[in-house]
Structures are given as structure tokens and as C-alpha cells.
């Protein structure tokens, strides 16, 4: 064939140039024999997935199939072999010295497959697509997708194309990703939801992608999208507006609905992440204004979804947007949004004054509820559970609203806030903020439930304290009994383990120790003495039973030292605590004197 790259073909297959260009005897063999021979040489058969040969060898089989198919349209299995060979072809290695030659061969074979006019053009076109992809010719592969569009069903084409384009998008190659964006335009026109998945399949790497998120948003805004009517009960942004596509893309990128992604981004805050958050807020704000204008009237369903998402971002604990910058873009009618930004800037009183300026207690109370939720979460995260630090009064989110109502001479509103939020408001601080002449009758709905609730909490805490105290006493008794049992045998006494007593030679039986007191109640102990004999030591084990009514501390059996005695006391192991009615052992170690050993 004129123009066939024989040099690259021989290099890619690893054969000589003469073998690649051979036209002698055997070329006119029967077509089935040629197909069988080619499959044998390449090691390819239907169902074979070992992929041990180069992509150029697979291309050779595809070339043979294309020739056979062109000569015999009735042979349906031949194009299937070409498709299997193309699918099973291994991916060319860019670091291989034959990479350029392999690409050239695959490109020529794929062009031949595309130019074949047989009845099985669909299988050969798909085979060409796979050859382009395995050879690293991604632009040619994406161009071939357009040919598959007319051969496949709409669902098959869109699912396959979206999956393949998403794979290419994740490669991170700038030129390839730019071509992916261009090729996705057609899919956005018919199925925006599936096309959006191309860019959001792996959200962990979206913010660090080679194509910056803000550039992707600009691309979304230039798309031509299908018309659609917004469902009045919809809870998600529409897919027929480029602005909403950009918003959904950024929502997935920052992990607004994915806690793990959000934590990963918040652990390494950066200016680029903050700019993405700012852009998302501006896109959502633009969507609201585009639907209803700067002066709120009747809010359509789409604007409600935009507004809900904007509030979600502004209240988000992982947000990194710049509230000062966003404040300049908000119209005066966006009072709730401005209040949320003021709260972000640690200025809740000004935010409440803004919401309460028209005596709109409901909006101000909702803002305080939001602030209370944020403060509660941050307090739980910052304070160690084992720490007994109390939350300061200044963290109460409702006191600024009480003060704002009192500054406007609206005592009734202040009391209403105290009544409706009595379980979470700082009750003492709220009462102290009221004017001294406030009648008690006006506070009836606050004081009576609060007193009952506090009394109930006091009873609950008392019961809990008694239960904890009882449990602690039980554990102390268990610990004491364990310690007493541990000191009841010679082998378990820790103080004696450091002494090298050696092997025990024997022991005497237990004998009771008599006292010489006239009244036995003056000596409320029963003592049994056992002697343990070692080569150079004698250990006296005194089992002491407390028969009195009081517990005894540091109870021990002392042995008096006598100057002319052979043994002298060396170690004394007392009983730290001996409760009434219990028994344990005290140990005394007697060591043989040096002169006695001589």
C-alpha cells in the first residue's frame, strides 16, 4: 500500500524491514488461513486477556480483519475478532524506544478501519477508537467518538463517552483535558447531568487539577444547554443553566455535601481554596439576583434553591470565604445574608441590629439559632471532654438579641426571646439585662418553667452524682480486696521480688500468736504466723485478721532486733489498709548476720 509506514511497522513489531515488506510466495494464501496465522503470531484469540504482546501486534490482527471484512461482508465473526484484539491491546509505554513507531502504526491501522465500508463498520470503528486510546493518541480517540455517536444508542454512547472522557480528565495532561472540555459540549446539550460527572467523578483532586476550577466554571457558562422547566418542589439546582452547572461543580469540589472532602481541604487552607469559596458564593448570589432581581418579591423555585445553597455555604463550618469581599457585592435587600457575613466577622450585635431594625423578631431569632449551632459545634471541638472548663457567658448567642430589643424599648420582645429559648439562653445574664422595674408577672412564663426545669435538672444531677459515688465506692472496695488478695501469698508481694532469696528450703505450719493483754477486746486482732526458710533468710508471714470496728492503716507484724541474735530484721512489708472484718498478710524478712555465717 502506498504510504504505508514500513520502517515504523518493522520497528514496532521487532522484525526486519525486508520481512515487513515481503511480497513473495505465500502472500496469496487463503484469507481464513491468513487470519488464523495472524492470530497465532500475535497470540490473540477471542476471550484472551493476557495482553502480553505489544499494541502494534494487536493492530496487525485488526489490519488483517479489515482486509478480510472488506472482501467478505457476510463473515460476521471477522470484525468481532478485530474488536476483541483492539480492546485487549496493552497500553503503549511512552518511555519505550519504539513508542513513536507504535503510535504511527496504530494510527495508520485505525484510519484503515475507519475507512472500511463493510456492513460491520460499527465494530471496526470501535476497534479504531480503542487502538487510538491504547497508543496514547487521545485526541484521535476523542474525535472517533463522534463516529460512534451515530452507530450506538443514545444511552450507550453517553455512558461510554462520559466514562472515557472522565478517565482522560483525570490524567492531568493539560492538552488532553482542554480537548475533553471541547468534546463534552455535545453531551451537555443532550444530558447535562451525565456530562457534569466527567468533571466531578473524583472530587478529592478537583481543586488541584491542572485546569483551575474557576476556568472550568467559565467554560460551563459558555455552554448551550437544553431548555427545561424548574420543578416547584425541586431541591437541587437546575441543569439547564451554565451558572447552576458551575455552582454544582464547585459544591462538589469543596465538599459541601461530603464531610471527608471538606475536612481534607480545611486541613490545608490556601488562597486558591478561599477564592473558590468566594466564587461559589458569587455564583449563587448571581443566580438569586438573576431570578428575582435585587428587591425581593415573589421568589420562584429556582431562586429558593439558590438561596438555600447560599445560606448553607455562609453557615458552613469549613467555609474559607472572605466576608469583607462578599459584603461589597450584597444589595441592601439581602439582610439575612449580610447578617450571616457579620456573624462570620465576629460582629453578631451589628447583624442582629440589621435584622431587628424593622422589628422583625423572627429573622433575628433564626440568625441567633444559627449562631448558637455554630458556637455549640466549635465549643465541643475545642474543649477537651475530660476538661472541666465551663463555657463563658459571652458565648450565649441570644443575649445580643435581648439587648437589642431592650435598646429599642421592646421589653416584650426580649421576654419572648427568653421564653422561647429558655433551655439554651443564659438565664441569669438575661434576667440581669432586664430593667429593674420589670414586673414579675410579665416573667411568669419564663420563671415558672425555668424553675421547674432547673429543679428537675438538680434532682437528675443529684441522682447521677449518687450513682457515680456508689460506683466509685464499689470500685474502691474491689481495688482494696484485690490488693489484699495480692498480698496474701509470698510469691505475689512486689517488695520481695527484688530480693534474691533463692530456693525455699521449707516452711513451718501456721501457729496462732497469743497476746498478754487481760482483756481481749483491747487487741482486736487474730494473728497466725508462718515461717519460710531460705539459705540466708527467714521470712515471717503474719496473717492478720481485723476483728474490730475500725479500719487500720499500715498494719504490720514487727520483730524486735536483739544484738546477740543470729537473725536481724531487714525488710518489713506492712498492709497499707486493713478494713474491719477482713484479713491479709504482713511480711518480715530476717537476714542472717555476717558473723553468724563465719
Image (cartoon, rainbow, N blue to C red):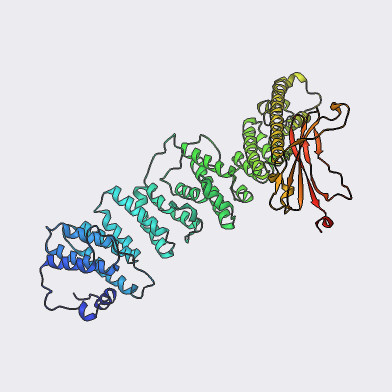
Q: Which residue is drawn at 84% across and 32% down?
A: 515
Q: Which of 46 and 323 is in front in this view?
A: 46
Would you identify the image quadrant in which residue 522 lies? top right
The number of discs equals 0
Is 354 positioned to the left or the right of 246 in the image? Answer: right
Q: Nearer the viewer, residue 576 or 251?
A: 576
Position of residue 101 relative to residue 280, above or below, is: below
Is 532 positioned to the left or the right of 235 in the image? Answer: right
Which x, y percent locates residue 437? 81, 23
Position of residue 41 relative to residue 7, above or below, is: above
Would you identify the image quadrant in which residue 433 lies? top right
Q: Which of 279 and 575 is in front in this view?
A: 575
Q: Can residue 282 be seen in this view?
A: no
Is 264 positioned to the left or the right of 200 in the image? Answer: right
Which x, y percent locates residue 598? 82, 59
Is 49 positioned to the left or the right of 481 in the image? Answer: left
Residue farthest to the bottom?
Answer: 18
Q: Quadrant of the N terminus?
A: bottom left
Q: Nearer the viewer, residue 541 or 31?
A: 541
Would you identify the image quadrant in which residue 54 lies? bottom left
Which x, y percent locates residue 565? 86, 49
Which x, y percent locates residue 262? 54, 49
Q: Can residue 359 be seen in this view?
A: yes
Q: Which residue is drawn at 65% across and 39% down?
A: 376
Amino acid at each position: 500500500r502506498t504510504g504505508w509506514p514500513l520502517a515504523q511497522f518493522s520497528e514496532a513489531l521487532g522484525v526486519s524491514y525486508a520481512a515487513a515488506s515481503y511480497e513473495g510466495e505465500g502472500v496469496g494464501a487463503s484469507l481464513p488461513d491468513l487470519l488464523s496465522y495472524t492470530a497465532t503470531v500475535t497470540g490473540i484469540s477471542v476471550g484472551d486477556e493476557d495482553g502480553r504482546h505489544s499494541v502494534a501486534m494487536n493492530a496487525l490482527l485488526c489490519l488483517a480483519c479489515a482486509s478480510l471484512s472488506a472482501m467478505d461482508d457476510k463473515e460476521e465473526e471477522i470484525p468481532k475478532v478485530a474488536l476483541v484484539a483492539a480492546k485487549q491491546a496493552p497500553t503503549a509505554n511512552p518511555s519505550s524506544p519504539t513508542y513513536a513507531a507504535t503510535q504511527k502504526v496504530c494510527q495508520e491501522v485505525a484510519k484503515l478501519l475507519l475507512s472500511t465500508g463493510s456492513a460491520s463498520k460499527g465494530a471496526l470503528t470501535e476497534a479504531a477508537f480503542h487502538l487510538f486510546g491504547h497508543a496514547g493518541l487521545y485526541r484521535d480517540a476523542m474525535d472517533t467518538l463522534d463516529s460512534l455517536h451515530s452507530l450506538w444508542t443514545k444511552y450507550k454512547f453517553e455512558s461510554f463517552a462520559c466514562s472515557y472522557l472522565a478517565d482522560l480528565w483525570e490524567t492531568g495532561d493539560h492538552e488532553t483535558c482542554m480537548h475533553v472540555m471541547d468534546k463534552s459540549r455535545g453531551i451537555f446539550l443532550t444530558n447535562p447531568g451525565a456530562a457534569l460527572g466527567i468533571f466531578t467523578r473524583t472530587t478529592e483532586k478537583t481543586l488541584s487539577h491542572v485546569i483551575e476550577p474557576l476556568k472550568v466554571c467559565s467554560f460551563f457558562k459558555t455552554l448551550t444547554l437544553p431548555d427545561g422547566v424548574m420543578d416547584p418542589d425541586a431541591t437541587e439546582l437546575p441543569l439547564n443553566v451554565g451558572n447552576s452547572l458551575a455552582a454544582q461543580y464547585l459544591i462538589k469540589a469543596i465538599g459541601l455535601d461530603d464531610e471527608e472532602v471538606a475536612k481534607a481541604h480545611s486541613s490545608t487552607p490556601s488562597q486558591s481554596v478561599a477564592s473558590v469559596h468566594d466564587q461559589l458564593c458569587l455564583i449563587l448570589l448571581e443566580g438569586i439576583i438573576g431570578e428575582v432581581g435585587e428587591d425581593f418579591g415573589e421568589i420562584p423555585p429556582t431562586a429558593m434553591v439558590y438561596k438555600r445553597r447560599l445560606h448553607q455555604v455562609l453557615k458552613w463550618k469549613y467555609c474559607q470565604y472572605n466576608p469583607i469581599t462578599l459584603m461589597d457585592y450584597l444589595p441592601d435587600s439581602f439582610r439575612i445574608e449580610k447578617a450571616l457575613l457579620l456573624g462570620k466577622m465576629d460582629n453578631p450585635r451589628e447583624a442582629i441590629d440589621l435584622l431587628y431594625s424593622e422589628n422583625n423578631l423572627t429573622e433575628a431569632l433564626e440568625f441567633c439559632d444559627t449562631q448558637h449551632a455554630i458556637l455549640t459545634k466549635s465549643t465541643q471541638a475545642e474543649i477537651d471532654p475530660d476538661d472541666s472548663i465551663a463555657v463563658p457567658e459571652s458565648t450565649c448567642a441570644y443575649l445580643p438579641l435581648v439587648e437589642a430589643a431592650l435598646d429599642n424599648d421592646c421589653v416584650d420582645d426580649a421576654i419572648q426571646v427568653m421564653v422561647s429559648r429558655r433551655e439554651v439562653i443564659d438565664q441569669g445574664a438575661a434576667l440581669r439585662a432586664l430593667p429593674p422595674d420589670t414586673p414579675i408577672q410579665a416573667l411568669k412564663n419564663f420563671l415558672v418553667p425555668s424553675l421547674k426545669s432547673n429543679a428537675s435538672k438538680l434532682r437528675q444531677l443529684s441522682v447521677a452524682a449518687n450513682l457515680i459515688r456508689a460506683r466509685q465506692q464499689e470500685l474502691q472496695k474491689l481495688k482494696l480486696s484485690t490488693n489484699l488478695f495480692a498480698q496474701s501469698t509470698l510469691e505475689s508481694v512486689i517488695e520481695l521480688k527484688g530480693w534474691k532469696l533463692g530456693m525455699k528450703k521449707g516452711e513451718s505450719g501456721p501457729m496462732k500468736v497469743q497476746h498478754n493483754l487481760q482483756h481481749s477486746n483491747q487487741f482486736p486482732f487474730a494473728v497466725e504466723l508462718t515461717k519460710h526458710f531460705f539459705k540466708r533468710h527467714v521470712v515471717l508471714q503474719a496473717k492478720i485478721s481485723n476483728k474490730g470496728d475500725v479500719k487500720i492503716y499500715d498494719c504490720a507484724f514487727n520483730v524486735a532486733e536483739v544484738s546477740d541474735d543470729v537473725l536481724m530484721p531487714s525488710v518489713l512489708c506492712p498492709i497499707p489498709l486493713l478494713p474491719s472484718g477482713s484479713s491479709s498478710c504482713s511480711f518480715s524478712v530476717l537476714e542472717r548476720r555476717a558473723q553468724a555465717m563465719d
